[in-house]
Image (spheres, rainbow, N blue to C red):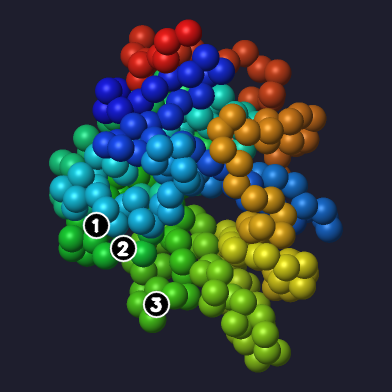
Amino acid sequence: MSEHIIRHDDGTASGVWGVHTLQSAFQPIFAFNEGKLSIVAFEGLIRPFRDGEPQSPMTFFNTCPAGDRLHIEALTRTLHLLNAGVCLPEEASIFVNFDPSVFTDRGVADKALRDMRLVLHEAGIDPRRMVCEVTEQKSASQEALYSFVEALRANGFRIAVDDYGADESDINRIKELKPDIVKFDAHWITQLMESGAGFALLTTMVRSFEQQGIRTVFEGLEEGWQLELAEKSGASMVQGFVLARPELAPTSFRVFGKGAPPPATATGAGETPAGPGAAPAARGARVFGRRTAS
């Protein structure tokens, strides 16, 4: 994996896969706290470039052979974690995507998690900051999916289910995976917000999840009225262009962490995050990637 990673003088990392250069972008996730919004987390998003020109992430992934998908997934997570250690507030949670279809058995999952623990150590990131976002792709089998999620949880990571509402099977997915966080599909929540009956249903679902101890995220919000209704619905967290667009690493987001105590929705009960001025965590001997020439 290290041969695909380039370390830069500013501490950030980028990736190389074939003719593409890969960069991390981070989008803030905000929590409602006594009528105010505060940044509590970030989602890592991959941004491919070819010959210096930005490419669609979907186009990039669709052109990659299926046999490479596991390695590309690992590369993108590695980039996000290395860059998060450099660019993000030290108390913020980090949402990172996992495609369950590439984890065909427990052995594959265990190796991926061993590698990720090394990256977390290198980046100085507490595993409790990690939120593993399980995407909607179908897994090789239900047994493989449950085993994978069990392995994530055993490593101390929180679980989020992505794109809730986009498929009729979603409620079963919630019951079976018992996630810590549910991210509502952007198109679906916008449709529900457009009618009184739809909004009432949305509010009921949010309340049901919250009563089960499951936090909720409304993503893809682009307009102020959506943000207002998200707050009225009782959603824990919100994400979208109406609040902040993704920024390529290195970002300007670290300044948001200064002097602001993190809300409970971000860090979890009993966790004491390090402040921005705290000494960095001890680094391991292993360093991922090669440095560019000065």
x and y percentages locating residue 243 in the rendered image? 72, 55
Q: Residue 137 — which label?
A: 2
Residue 229 appears left or right of 128: right
Q: Earlier in the sequence, mark 3 or mark 1?
A: 1
Q: Residue at x 69, y 24 (%)?
A: 276
**Alpha carbon separation for disc pair 2 and 3:** 11 Å
Asked if disc 1 and disc 2 are in contact, CB closer than 8 Å, the reply is yes
Per the rendering, the mark at residue 167 is 3
Tell me the SS state at disc 3.
loop
Residue pointed to by mark 1: 101
Q: Does residue 64 sit above or below 225 in this rendering?
A: above
Q: Nearer the viewer, residue 253 or 229?
A: 253
Which amino acid, mark 2?
Answer: Gln
Contact (CB < 8 A) between labels 2 and 3? Answer: no
The kind of secondary structure element at disc 2 is loop
- Mark 1 residue type: Ser
CB within 8 Å, label 3 to label 1: no
Q: Nearer the viewer, residue 265 or 44?
A: 44
CA gap, disc 1 to disc 2?
A: 6 Å
Which tag, 2 or 3, sits closer to the chain's start? 2
Residue 90 appears in the picture as rendered:
yes
Q: Residue at x 47, y 75 (%)?
A: 165
